[in-house]
Image (tube, rainbow, N blue to C red):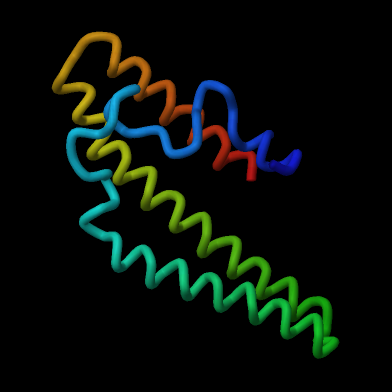
Amino acid sequence: MTAREATVTSATEPVGAPCHGDEAPSGPHGYSKQKDQHLKRLRRIEGQIRGLQRMVEEDVYCIDILTQVSASTKALQSFALQLLQEHLRHCVADAALKGGSEIDAKVEEASAAIARLLRT
């Protein structure tokens, strides 16, 4: 794990943690209904990144590359916001229905995710 990955992944938020607490999720993740659309979107973003690599290889003007970096960053941020919205609608709403301390944990988890998005 790189230093950057260690920064992004904290002890309170394990990678791949299920939406439904510590046990395995009882149902699909919030993004499951949109999975094909998300994968298509991520492939498009991947293409943008590869385009950036080509631009550098071909010695394209700096400002043109920076414009594409900005577009790629915006695409990733938009994707992240969509996932966050789906998490709130699915996982946080599910925890609210169950009641108890699980809702507090889910709200805290979502708040931490929002804070990470704001830092980028």
**Picture residue at 37% right of the left edge, 52% below the top:** 82
Which residue occupies the foreground of this view, 75 or 106? 106
Image-based side of 3 in relation to 118, left or right? right
Where's residue 41, x and y in %?
Answer: 41, 69
Does 50 sit above or below residue 88? below
Toward which corner of the image does residue 108 lie, by quadrant? Answer: top left
Furthest-bottom residue in this view: 58
Where's residue 76, x and y in %?
Answer: 52, 59
Quarter containing the C terminus: top right
Does 112 sit above or below residue 16? above
Does 22 sit above or below residue 9? above
Where's residue 4, x and y in %?
Answer: 72, 42
Where's residue 90, x and y in %?
Answer: 23, 38
Furthest-left residue in this view: 97
Image-based side of 114 in relation to 72, left or right? left
Quarter containing the N terminus: top right
Image-based side of 103 in relation to 42, left or right? left
**Picture residue at 64% right of the left edge, 78% below the top:** 50
**Picture residue at 22% right of the left edge, 9% below the top:** 100
Does 82 sit above or below residue 91? below
**Picture residue at 66% right of the left edge, 41% below the top:** 5
Q: How many marks?
A: 0
Which residue occupies the foreground of this view, 23 or 58? 23
Image-based side of 15 in relation to 19, left or right? right
